Image: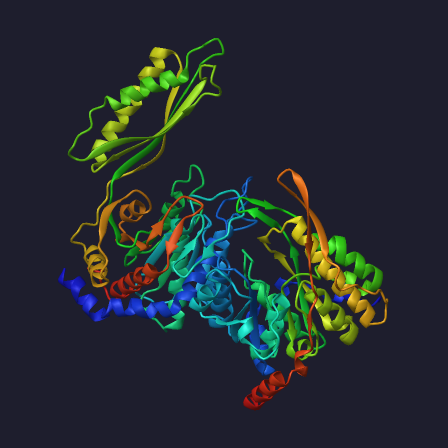
Amino acid sequence: MTKAKDFLAVLGDLGGYAKKLETYRDLIVGNIIRVGEESSVLPDPPIDPSVDPFLGNERARAFGERLLEIGIDECSIDGAGNPVGIIKGRKASAPPILVAAEIDSKYQPDWDWHYSVSAEAIKGPGVTDNAVAAACLVTIADLARLEDMTFDSDIYLVGFANTTVPGNDYGAIDRFLANLGQKTRGALILKGTELGRVNYFTRATLRATIACERKDEEDRQNMILVGHEILEGLLAIRLPQKPSTELIVGKFSGGAKFGSPAECCEMGIELRSDSTDILDELASRLADVVESVGLERGVNASLRVKSRRGAKNIGYDHPLTRASLSALASLGVEPAVSASYSELFFFLDRGVAAITLGMTEGRRQQTDEAEALIAPLYKGLAQIVGLLRTMDGGLCDA
Amino acid sequence: MPEKSWFEGNTYHHSTFKDVAELVKKKEDRGLRISLCFPTLNEESTIGKEIVIARSELQLRNHLVDEIVVIDSGSRDRTLEVARSFGATTYTAEELLPDLPPCKGKGENLWKALYVLTGDIIVYMDADIKNIHPRFIYGLIGPLLLREEVRYVKAFYQRPIALDPRNVLPAGGGRVTELVVRPLFSLFFPDLAQVMQPLSGEYAAYREILEVLPFPIGYGVETSMLIDIYKRFGMEAIAQVDLDKRIHRNQSTTALGRMSFGIVKTFFRKLSEYGISSIELDETRQMIQYVLEDGGYDRKSFPIEIFERPPIISIPAYRDRAGRREGIDA
C-alpha cells in the first residue's frame, strides 16, 4: 500500500495531467475515428496469413499503420494477426510492460457505417466496444512522442485482433502471451467503458452450447420440448451461495415455422463461479443432464464447451490494484470493482500481474447509436500514463 | 512513343500523394501557405468530424494545412458553434465585405473566402462528407505542390449516396454530371469531358488563379470555374484526383432538376461570353416543375437567378488586404 502511494506521490498531480491532455483532444478524437471506422470483420472465406498478415482485418491494419505513421520505435504483427508497437525503453535489461486492448468491435453492422462527432461525443457502432480503447493505445504512442516520454522498460502496445472469430474466444491472446517468451513487469488492459472500471480478478467461467436434434426422419419429437427438458434439468442443479455460483441461459433457438415440431434446437449457457473446483464439478453435472435426457428421449443431445477459464485474482492488496484505485481517487473517479470475464484471465493464468481499466463513459452500447464521451477520456488516459510510470518505476517488481 | 493524353498525364489516385511529409517539405521549401475552407449551410452533423480530422492529421501531426476556415451562409443549426469548438475560424458570408450588396449561395462563400483566407493555395471542401479522410485534402494538394504547371485540382470519386445510414447505394451520384454537364462539355468543350466529376465540391487551386475568376453565386460556380480556367490557362493547368469513395447526402430528382437549370443557364452565358454561341437567354424565365400534392399535380416555378461576383482582384478592399498580406509575408 505504502509503495503504491509513494509511486503516486512521485507521479504528482494526475488531475493536472488530465487537464493537460485536453490540449490533445483533436489527436485523440482523430485516432478514434481513423482506427474505429475501419471494419474488424474478417473476410469470408478467410485470408491466408501468408497473403495478408492482418488476415483482412482492416482495423488491425489501420492500427499498425497508425503506429508506424506516429514513428513508434518498432511495429510488428504476430502469427495470429495481433499488431504490436514497441516504445523502446532505456534499459535493455528491464522486462517489458504490456498495455493491451482488444481492438475489434463485437457489434458491427453489415452496412457502411461512419462515426459522427460533436463537441461532447463520438457516435457510431462499436465506438465504445472497443474502438476507443484501441485508439487510446495509439494515443499513448502519440503522447510518448509529443511529450518526450521515456521509460526504462520497453512498452508493448498490443492490439488483440480477431477475438470475435467464432471458436477463437480470446485464443489469440493466450497465444500472444505464450509466445512472448519473457518475463514482464505487468500489464494494463484497456476497455472502452466505463471509466472507473477496475477488474483485478476473474470468475471461473464455462461457456457451452447444448444442441438437440432428431436421430432419424421418422422421429416427430419436438426438439424445443426436449431442449426444455434439458433446461429444467440444468435449473434443478443446486448451486452453492458460497462460493458464489450462477448459471446463465443466454440463448435459446430452434424450429423453422409455426406449424411444424422443431427438428433441432440450440441453447447457449454460461456457468460462473468464484471457485474453479465448483465450476468443474458442476460442469460434469451439466454434461450428465444433457446425456441422460438424450438417452431417455432417443435423440442426439450434445454439450460442446466453447471455453473454460478458471478463477484468478491478483488481490486487493497487490500494488497494481492499490495504485489503480489510488489513481482513480486522485482523479476524482469513483471505482467500480467487478470480475472480468474476458482477457484478464489469460494474463493472470500466465503469472502476469494485470488489471483491466475503463477509458471513458459511454451510452447506448452495442447499438448503431453507441456514444463515447470525449471529456472523460482525459482522465482515462491520465490513469494509464500514471500507472505506466509507476510500473516503470518498479511498482510490480517485488 | 506516343505522347500521353491529358487524361493519362493529369489523372491521379490519392495514394500517389500519401507521403504527407514530402508534401510538407515541398510546401515549406517554396514558402507557401495552405488554407482549407469549408462553405457551410446547416452542417452540424458532419462539420465537427471534418475539422477534427483535418486538424489532427494535417495540422497537428503534419503541418500541411495552415488554417481551417468555415464560411457560413446563415445556418440555423449549431454549425458555427461546433466548428468553433473544434478550432476552426468561422465567418458568416454576410459579415465579410459588408459594403457590397448581399448575395446568398455557395459561390458567395467561396468568393468571399478569398478575402479572409491567407493561403497561397486554397482547398475548398464540402462540409457534408460522412467518410472524411485526410486523403480528401492531401490528395488535392499533392499535384499543386509536385507539378509546377498544375494550378487547379479537381476531385472525383465513387459516389455512393446515403438514403439513410443503413441504405447506401453503391452508385447513383453524379446524375447531373452524366445527364447535363458531360453532354454539354462534349458538344462545346470536348477537352473538359475528360474531367470525371466537374461538379465535385472539392477542389484546390492557387490563389492567383482563383482571384482572377468571376464566381457565379448559385449552382453554376463549379462549371463556370472549370470553363474559365480551361479557356484562360489551358488543360495543362488542370489535374484531377481519384479520392475513392465519398458518401454524401442524397438529393431529390426535383432538387437536381433545379440545379441543372442553374448550370445550363451559367453554361449558356459562358458560351456567349467566349463567342461560341449567341443564344439569347430570357433571364426572367423560371424553372417549372410539377409536384404531386394532395392527389393532384401542383405547378411550381423556381426563379433560379445567376448572379456573378466579379474577379475578386477587382475589389479594392481585397487588393488592400492582399497588399497587406504580401507586406507581412515579405
Q: Residue at x 22, y 53 (%)?
A: A335
Q: Where B164 sits versus A218, above or below?
A: below
Task: Give left or right: position of A99 versus B221.
Answer: left
Task: Give left or right: position of A39 versus A25.
Answer: right
Q: Where A298 sits versus A171, above or below?
A: above
Q: Residue at x 26, y 54 (%)?
A: A196
Task: Give left or right: position of B274 versus B218.
Answer: right
Foreground of the two, B130 or A325: B130
Foreground of the two, A158 or B198: B198
Pinpoint residue A292: horizontal percent, then vertical percent.
Answer: 31, 16
**Considering the image in quadrants, where does the N terminus of chain A appear?**
bottom left
* Count of number-bearing discs: 0
Pinpoint residue A311: horizontal percent, then vertical percent.
Answer: 24, 41
Pinpoint residue A396: horizontal percent, then vertical percent.
Answer: 22, 59
Q: Is residue A85 visible?
A: yes
Pinpoint residue A111: horizontal percent, then vertical percent.
Answer: 53, 44
Q: Is residue B172 visible?
A: no
Foreground of the two, A247 or A293: A247
Furthest residue to the top?
A: A218
**Considering the image in quadrants, where does the C terminus of chain A appear?**
bottom left
Furthest residue to the left?
A: A2
Which color scheme does this rendered protein use?
Answer: rainbow
Foreground of the two, A372 or A358: A372
Residue A261, image quadrant: top left
